[in-house]
Image (cartoon, coloured by chain):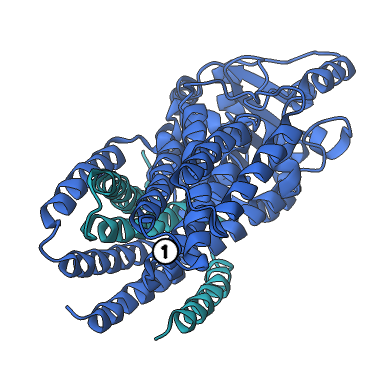
Chain colours: A blue, B cyan
């Protein structure tokens, strides 16, 4: 196949990727969009495979069977709740591939010092660096979400300064590599140091902020791939990688905006760390009286309400309670209760995490209300049922300037007549921040596993 | 095409891709943010194409081969896993098929 024909076929792939992103704008066409993207990817892979010719076709096939087989099995087997760490994992291996390509390309050029152009060297140095950061950072994000290591921020003195110094040193090495010190060891230092930076960069970020981190690392991998396109003089890598780099950046900013925090604050403030002090203040203020209720009591409240709003959080995902919530909602609707779901943009561990879970349980997306739409509704809501959510309904975000989440827009569930909080215990949430909502006189707590509590509620509603 | 011409050309499409990426994504509703992240994650799986090119290049010994092979393995895990996970998520987004039934 001539290079021209191959480039034209690559153009088809590029168009399908753009269409895929466009179709993702609408729930009705999103799935088709993803399939179009996959078809375009297949075209690019087949074209490249044919172009590769006879030299290594079997090695390519073997590598793809191993990698693709792992990817397919892992993606099929994973539970909906473990989706965020799965995305982190696939993102990381993509970044790793970009870093490996940089290592291989430099090795190929080096016997001929002075041959590679400076732009190719820049591309090698920086795709190696960014790819390594993305790989290591994603693995730490994966480990945190999989709870292989603690979700709490890990901090030590001089952390940000240390990270900045490391990054500056790596940058200097990358520049040195680009302008003439052509030694493979230098690239190994850049890649190894990049991996170290990825670890140090993600470790201090609390588990609750992982969605933003994964989104940012996704953009990083896209950027590394785009830069890799310059090494290999390949348009499809440049365009597809940069589309992801740009869209991932925008998504990251949108998520930051939803939390009313700048990206710098998200990434460098070791969120959740100040909570110990603030929690003590909050608990002291509130006086610490908590009302708890039985499932039967709550069932009566729900069955005789006009309007019930479910507010799901990560606890719903952990307990796999989405199907039971939907059954409960169906029973309430059968009794003439108006049921909606209020979705905070950063509820769960990824943006839209709750939408995915509830969609899995066949909740029609017309019942899912985003924050701006949901908040004015709470004043005419009889019962707001908080299922495993915590920080996104914490009134401290509105009032307590000492709280680490002060200023984050929240779902104002305390405007409802009654708030029912389903919670395992009085332990603070993932971010470790105390929540005065639980001490509000309007609030009743229903302790226990979210799934068991919902099932009990459903049984009690049925018995009425 | 001379190397510099090619470079200018590549930088041009890079910059256009940045604007296109922003433009296409700004219309995605929050509802679809997770599938979007996962879908773009699959698209940067295009890195597998780069890995294949590296593996198919005339070799300079075992190093390039091993590294290229590893890159193909990682890249294909990214691309296959990414699209399959996204498809699983999107499979679940449906409108209500039937009006709610009364259990009685």
Of residues A440 and A250, the one nearer the viewer is A250
Q: Position of residue A343 (x, y in %)?
A: 59, 46
User: Residue A81 is drawn in which quadrant?
Assistant: top left
Q: Position of residue A420 (x, y in %)?
A: 65, 28
- Name the quadrant of the C terminus of chain B: top left
* Relative to A11, A317 lies left or right: right
* Relative to A17, A124 lies left or right: right
Q: Position of residue A207 (x, y in %)?
A: 59, 31
Q: Chain of mark 1?
A: A
Q: Residue at x 24, y 39 (%)?
A: A70
Of residues A242 and A167, the one nearer the viewer is A167
Q: Residue at x 58, y 69 (%)?
A: B22
Does the rendering let one see residue A458? no
Residue tagged by mark 1?
A231
Q: Residue at x 34, y 49 (%)?
A: B78
User: Residue A303 is drawn in which quadrant?
Assistant: top right
Of residues A243 and A231, the one nearer the viewer is A231
Tell me if mark 1 has few (under 14), some (14-19) or many (20+) residues whose alpha carbon lies within 10 angstroms of its own.
Answer: many
Tag count:
1
Vertical comparison of B69 with A436: above or below: below
Q: Residue at x 66, y 27 (%)?
A: A431
* Relative to A179, A8 lies left or right: left
Vertical comparison of A290 with A165: above or below: above
Does the rendering let one see residue A52? yes
- Secondary structure category for the residue under label 1: helix
* Relative to A208, A120 lies left or right: left
Of residues B98 and A78, the one nearer the viewer is A78
Q: Position of residue A36 (x, y in %)?
A: 31, 68
């Amino acid at each position: 196949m001539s290079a021209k024909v191959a480039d034209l076929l690559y153009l088809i792939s590029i168009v399908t990727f753009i269409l895929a992103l466009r179709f993702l704008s609408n729930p009705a066409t999103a799935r088709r969009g993803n399939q179009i993207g996959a078809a375009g990817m297949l075209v690019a892979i087949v074209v490249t495979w044919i172009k590769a010719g006879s030299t290594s076709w079997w090695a390519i096939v073997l590598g793809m069977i191993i990698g693709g087989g792992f990817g397919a099995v892992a993606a099929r087997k994973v539970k909906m709740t473990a989706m965020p760490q799965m995305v982190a994992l696939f993102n990381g291996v993509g970044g790793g591939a970009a870093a490996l390509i940089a290592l291989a390309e430099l090795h190929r050029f080096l016997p001929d010092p002075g041959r590679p152009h400076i732009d190719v060297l820049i591309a090698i140095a920086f795709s190696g660096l960014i790819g390594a950061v993305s790989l290591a950072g994603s693995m730490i994000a994966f480990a945190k979400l999989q709870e292989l290591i603690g979700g709490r921020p890990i901090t030590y003195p001089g952390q940000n300064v240390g990270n900045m110094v490391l990054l500056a040193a790596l940058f200097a090495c990358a520049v040195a590599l680009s302008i003439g010190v052509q030694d493979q060891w230098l690239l190994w230092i850049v890649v190894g140091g990049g991996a170290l930076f990825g670890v140090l960069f993600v470790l201090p970020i609390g588990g609750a902020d992982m969605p933003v981190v994964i989104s940012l690392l996704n953009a990083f991998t896209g950027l590394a791939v785009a830069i890799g396109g310059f090494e290999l003089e390949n348009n499809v890598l440049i365009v597809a990688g940069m589309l992801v780099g740009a869209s991932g950046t925008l998504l990251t900013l949108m998520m930051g905006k939803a939390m009313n925090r700048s990206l710098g604050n998200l990434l460098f403030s070791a969120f959740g760390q100040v909570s110990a002090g603030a929690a003590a203040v909050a608990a002291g203020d509130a006086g610490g009286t908590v009302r708890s209720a039985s499932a039967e009591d709550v069932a009566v409240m729900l069955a005789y309400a006009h309007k019930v709003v479910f507010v799901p959080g990560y606890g719903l995902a952990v307990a796999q309670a989405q199907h039971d919530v939907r059954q409960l909602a169906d029973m309430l609707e059968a009794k003439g209760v108006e049921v909606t779901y209020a979705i905070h943009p950063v509820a769960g561990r990824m943006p839209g995490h709750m939408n995915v879970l509830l969609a899995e349980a066949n909740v029609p997306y017309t019942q899912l209300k985003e924050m701006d739409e949901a908040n004015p509704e709470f004043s005419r809501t009889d019962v707001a049922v908080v299922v495993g959510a915590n920080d996104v309904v914490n009134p401290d975000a509105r009032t307590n300037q000492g709280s680490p989440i002060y200023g984050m827009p929240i779902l104002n569930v305390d405007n409802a007549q009654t708030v029912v909080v389903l919670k395992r215990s009085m332990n603070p949430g993932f971010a470790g921040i105390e929540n005065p909502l639980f001490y509000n006189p309007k609030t009743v707590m229903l302790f226990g596993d979210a799934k068991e509590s919902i099932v009990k509620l459903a049984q009690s509603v049925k018995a009425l | 095409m001379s190397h510099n011409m090619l470079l200018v050309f590549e930088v041009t499409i890079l910059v256009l891709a940045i604007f296109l990426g922003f433009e296409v994504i700004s219309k995605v509703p929050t509802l679809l943010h997770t599938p979007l992240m996962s879908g773009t994650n699959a698209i940067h799986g295009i890195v597998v194409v780069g890995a294949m090119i590296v593996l198919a290049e005339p070799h300079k010994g075992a190093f390039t081969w091993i590294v290229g092979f590893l890159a193909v393995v990682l890249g294909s895990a990214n691309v296959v896993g990414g699209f399959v996970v996204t498809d699983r998520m999107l499979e679940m987004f449906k409108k209500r098929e039937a009006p709610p039934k009364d259990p009685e």
